[in-house]
Image (cartoon, helix red, strand yellow):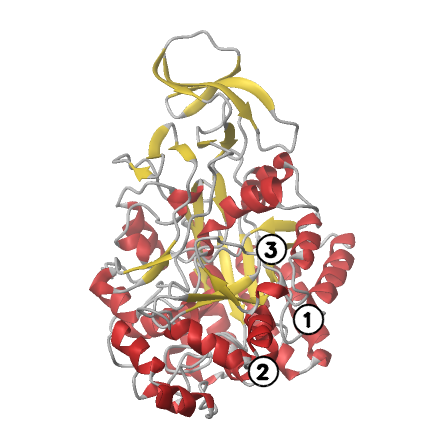
Amino acid sequence: MLDWLIEGGTVVDGTGGAPFTADVGVKDGRIVAVGKITEAARERVDANGAWVTPGFVDIHTHYDGQATWDETFSPSIHHGVTTVVMGNCGVGFAPVRKGHEADLIKLMEGVEDIPGAALAEGIRWNWESFPQFMDALDATPHSLDFLLQIPHDPVRMAVMGERAFTQQAAGADDIVAMRALVREALQAGAVGFSSGRSDNHRTSEGKETPASEATSAELCGIASAFEGLSHGVIQMVSDFDVLKGPERFDVEFDLVEAVARASNRPLSMTWLQRDPGGAQWQAIRERVDIAVSKRLPLYLQTAARGIGVINGLEASFHPFMGFPGFKEIAHLPLTERAAAMRDPARKTRVLGEKSDRMAGDGTAIPPLVDILLARIELISGRMFPLDANLNYEPDVMQSFLVRAKQRGTTALEALYDHLAEGEGNNLIYFPIFNYNDGSLSAVRSMLEHPRALAGLSDAGAHVGTVCDASFTTFMLTHWVRDRASGNLSLERAVEMMTSRNARYLGLTDRGTIAVGQRADVNVIDPQRLSVGVPALVRDLPAGGKRFLQKGVGYLGTWVAGQLVQRDGEITAARPGRLVRAGR
């Protein structure tokens, strides 16, 4: 007898092949039959009119801290994800030297916008080494499967101590010690190694991240830890020194290639249309194409939409946070703050001011914020009201720039009035990256690239500015169902989020609807499917707040044959475990 029989659905099997109508039979955590099934089953699911897909594999999350207190990986569980990868961008919580846990919290709080108080209260710290961290997470059952990468910054801090924060070049002995820690993690089942080289990443104290300027000798020495192993990937994020001038691009890309050669393992990098540096994504594409032609295993982690921030009076960012006249009232409760903003004298004063410098020592705010604030009138053409009619590809006619012109005011005043309205709950959508052209045309081109990997959701991070864990749902709504032109086929979108990501990681037991595969399955109502409207909630430890976006239309999500989510409600099932790569 089958455990589950999913009947009559449109199977999108994850291979990229055309969808077909079939039943899917599940027993003992595996798919045991696909086709017309007559065998009895303990539970039946009527999937007529629904899509039946493999569970989605999210290769770019930051649940490293949340996984210690949240068994469900919310909000990913609400968007069809059944496997997550943590330890991205070179930041994480292991290895850690006893007594230096706060340094890793400051690092993660600054880089990934996760409240430090929530991390301090929620993380148990019952580990020191990376294998111990793996064991600690594996000891708690979770809803979803997860894999871990060992991040560069904690490794550097564990070996070099205070020297790690001074951008001092690692010595030969340091590199040998770092390589040993990475090798130890890989042999314990870590799926890879990650490193971050972005000028936008800062600790909560405004310091550069420890490995942001690591030399080629250091990176290649660490990458040699993969020698002789048949598993593992490398993930890197770099802005290729875009703020230092285009002449730095090739130097940085040469370093990425050197790391790929030293490891001889698949390496994926962040791929964005930046601002400033709007043409850089095309230069990255050209260099990757040349490298791949020379058999270097390079891949491009690609977002599903604009990489942007949600601005609001309670969010981590908004356009007036640096204005002296606003800072005087920033401590007030929200409704009082909004009312104070509506005071005519206050409004006149703020609109006549310039923002104070926000980036620098003592703050995690990156230099990019000051660059953008100085161009607020110009970039307001990419700032839009965010309401229940959620639109992640809005037309410039909906922007605050156009609204201001229609009202005969400045864009800054239009933004001010929007935030000050009512109880102060209004939000602004500002796609900083991937929206230079006023559309997602660059993203469409990226998604077509054969080395593109569906990634960059940052699920679990930037909780006060984004909720891009919904990328998977957005792929199916916007790119498959709703966009007027330039759509992706359903089978292509599903293949990118399932088997392509799984094979990149070296996972052969999931990613397709086929006999013998793990029963990681979604049943989706394509008519009801929606990313959901972001809402600011206070459900983190220590009362920390985050934007939460719950997808609608997932009739059921199964992990290893157990139902973990039914129509938006998380079940008590906890089949998820640490996946140890190479085991």
Q: Residue placed at 48% from the left, 91% from the top?
A: 354
Local secondary structure at mark 3 = strand
- Residue 486 against residue 298 in the figure, above or below: above
Image spot of residue 352 (x, y percent):
47, 92
Q: Residue placed at 52% from the left, 59% from the top?
A: 225
Please give the residue where the numbered disc 3 appears in the rendered image.
302
Earlier along the polypeptide chain: callout 1 or callout 2?
1
Along the line of sight, the residue nearer the viewer: 507 or 65: 65
- Residue 114 against residue 83 in the figure, above or below: below
Q: Quadrant of the C terminus?
A: top left
Image spot of residue 325 (x, y percent):
37, 90
Local secondary structure at mark 1 = loop
- Residue 350 against residue 483 in the figure, above or below: below
Whether residue 230 appears in this view of the structure is no
Q: Which mark is residue 375?
A: 2
Mark 2: few/some/many CA within 10 Å (<14, 14-19, 20+)? few
User: What is the three-letter code of the residue carrying label 3?
Assistant: Thr
Q: Residue placed at 56% from the left, 63% from the top?
A: 236
Q: Which mark is residue 192?
A: none
Q: Residue most toward the front?
A: 407
The Cα–Cα distance between marks 3 and 1, rounded to whole angstroms, is 15 Å
Nearer the camera: disc 1 or disc 2: 2
Along the line of sight, the residue nearer the viewer: 270 or 402: 402
Mark 3: few/some/many CA within 10 Å (<14, 14-19, 20+)? many
Mark 1: few/some/many CA within 10 Å (<14, 14-19, 20+)? some
Image spot of residue 417 (x, y percent):
43, 76
User: What is the three-letter code of the residue carrying label 1?
Assistant: Gly
Q: Which mark is residue 278?
A: 1
Q: Quadrant of the N terminus?
A: top left
Local secondary structure at mark 2 = loop
Image spot of residue 443 (x, y percent):
65, 56
